[in-house]
Amino acid sequence: MKRSILILLLLLGWVSFGSPASVLAQGEPPVSAAEEIRSLLFEAQRTFSSDPISTAQKIQEAQSVYGSVLQVEIVSAQPENDQRIIAGFAEMRTALTGQDAPGFAAARSEVWTAVLRGSMAVVESAIRRGEPTLAQSWLQVREFRTATRFSRPNADATLALQNLTLGQLTPELALQYVHADLYDTYQARLNETLRELEEADQKQFTSRRAELAGLVKGYFLILSPAFKDQHGEEAQRSLLVQVDTLVSKSVAGKSVEQELVVFLSALENFRAAPLSPAEQSRRAGQLLRYLKLVPVEYARGVSGGVVTRELEIQEAITFYQAAQAAFEDLSSLMAEKDAETTAAVKADLSSLGQALTATSTQVQVADPQQIQKVADSLQSQLNAIMPAEWLQASSSGDFDVIDSMLNQMETATRSGEYELAESARLEAYAVLESGPEAKLSVVAPQAKIVIEDLFWNGQGENKGLAYLIAQQAPLTEIKASRQALSAELKTVQPLLEEQSAPAAVVTNAGIIVFREGLEAILILASLLASFKGAESARYRRPMWVGTVLALLATVLTWFLARSILSSLARYGERLEAVVSIIAVGVLLLITNWFFHKTYWSDHLAGFHAKKRSLLSAEAGITLGLISLGFTSVYREGFEVVLFLQALVLEGNTQLVLLGIGVGLAATLLIGLVTFKLQAHLPYMQMLVITGMMIGAVLLIMIGKTVHVLQVVGWLPTSPIGSIVLPFWSGTWLGTYATWEGVLLQFVAGVFVVGSYYFAEGKRTGKPVSLLKRALNFKR
């Protein structure tokens, strides 16, 4: 009783204390004053029970800061908001007198959100009056979306005011940008607070429930003008009554479950700041990508019904939260198309979140297959209701996911879990390869090589992440390489985020098909033209069989990639490496056989009597030719499929198919001309020239194969000093500035030339110039 009287006397006679020393002077930035108020009120709540005198002092200091720095502008812009702030301070004093902790918490939240609302009103008023400098200073009194590794602060309002100051934007447009930015922020905050309030209500945390209810009311008051515009004044008034009930019941220590249901139902189709088409696609991409990663991470953390890796479960929860936040941003738009399915997605997301939470708290460990089943169901439902443009690749969304996976890689490294770090690195690279890489190959091929080196086994100033993880390098080295990689990705991201015109998508698809088709034609023309006489048809037939099989396999890969693109992309470089090794091996054998078969005719004549044994050898040659035709064409086909899938996401299937048609038409035209001319070329000249072409193809293929093997870490990488070759030397010649690639290409060249001279020497007893033979031969 004495304590309450002391507090009452203190409050009634406060004027005798004078102005507190911490009050900011007139002219201080509004943001400094706002932060001082927030800090003081936080401290006041912290000492509420233990030191009521200090709490009373903090309340008075906060009100003095408000009165000396913020009040004048807020009264001018929105008088009723000033009244709400003053009333909030009075409610805190009343709660302190009555030792009403929930009431104090709710009042504190309402004061802070009223300051935010007042700041927004000042910014709006300053823009309309043509005072951008004042608007800029007050815009800093704001909140942002909760900072996570998946979200970035929105700077649209700041940029709009800068452009307004420079005269590059009209006040009307600047106001639209400010509203979009702040409404987006506070709706995200409202959604987050509602989730926290629901949890606090279930756990019966009385003060926390009241504090969150006050924040809900404050955030909704900021958004209420937009709600009124969309749903009408009557709906706005009804919801304001509902939110007042929410606060009063929480202050009284009662459950607000029923009020939450009504309030959430009223907000289901409300989006305060309409998202731009680009933002819609970006967040849809995030939703689908993060949702796909949830069961992947979860399965790595659970085995035999037991949590084996808590870090993986936390990652699964983090990805789930990112997906849920993206869904909340898009749910109202999806509900307009299909409210029933959107509601089902919301329910399934909630069930998924509950399962993940139960696992993380060891209450009940869900089966990974069940988590995968729910995630697959969500993916199917979302694909069914999302507009086609949302399902197209968003480079921004891709880079968000890549960045989050690289963060996970660092976290795993910090914990010494290098296996998990490698898994996260692979996931990040899979997103890059299944999304942005196709466009990157066209718009920034030089950067692509640098990025691949940093992702894999580069040995430059910053070594590749795959190499460092395999060596279990210190976190400092891995962070340095990650930062270098992030810098490269940041550099190319603006290029990739430029919206592609339909003509560009068609052109890119056509270029990819035509370029890879030319490589396949070169190989086939070189080999087919080398067969002579009666044997030609017999040896050409298996080559064509292999080619047809490769084309069929490419078509099959296309359909498979449409459904399991992530799985293919995850091992894309390794699969390409395996196919390349097979192609080079078969090509070496065929090159050797080609020279020996062509120039050792006399030597082989003595073995004609051994027909039966040769038949088995012939069968091996036939199988080798089929394999060569298949691997040479399928290697290019696999790469085409991978890149075209990315273009399908960037544009759409129809545009890409049109590009494929253009590319195939050009490839077939070149192929027909090439194969038709073969029949009329002088035989020996064609024979020798195609032999040289086989050698060239072999050198190029070996160079590219070495590069792929270095990328995946199956060969070491030793740079040749500081030599930097132009990107086309790798793209067209397979030549990269590494000792391994150059030396192996040199060895292959020696093999090709040496094979010819050795074979010719065996036939004639003396070597003859290959060029001279080609030019002087008389048909």
Image (cartoon, rainbow, N blue to C red):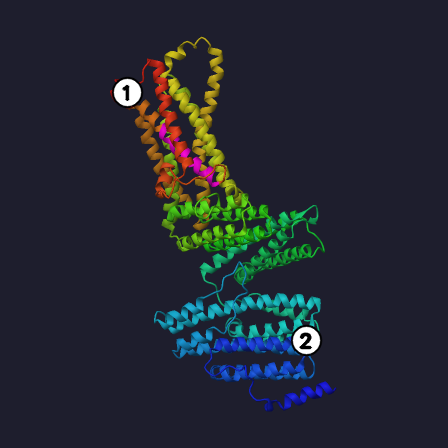
Q: Which label sits on residue 267?
A: none
Disc 1 secondary structure class: helix
Residue identified by numbered label 1: 773
Residues 558 and 356: in front is 356
Percent position (x, y) of residue 280?
A: 48, 59
- What residue is disc 2 on? 249
Whichever of labels 1 and 2 marks the residue nearer the N terminus, that label is 2
Most common secondary structure along the magenta stretch = helix
Q: Is 358 inside the magenta-drawn segment? A: no
Quick check: 674 above or below 756?
A: below
**In magenta stretch: residue 709:** yes
Residue 639 lies left or right of residue 775; in this view the side is: right
Residue at 47%, 32% (x, y): give it. Answer: 581
CA separation, marks 1 and 2? 100 Å
Q: Position of residue 609 (x, y in %)?
A: 45, 8
Q: Nearer the viewer, mark 1 or mark 2?
A: 1
Amino acid at pointer 1: Arg
* Picture quadrant of residue 687: top left
Choose between 134 and 539: the one closer to the eye. Answer: 134
Measuring 41% from the left and 53% from the top, which residue is drawn there? 492
Q: Is residue 237 left or right of residue 175?
A: right
What secondary structure is found at the residue carrying circle 2? helix
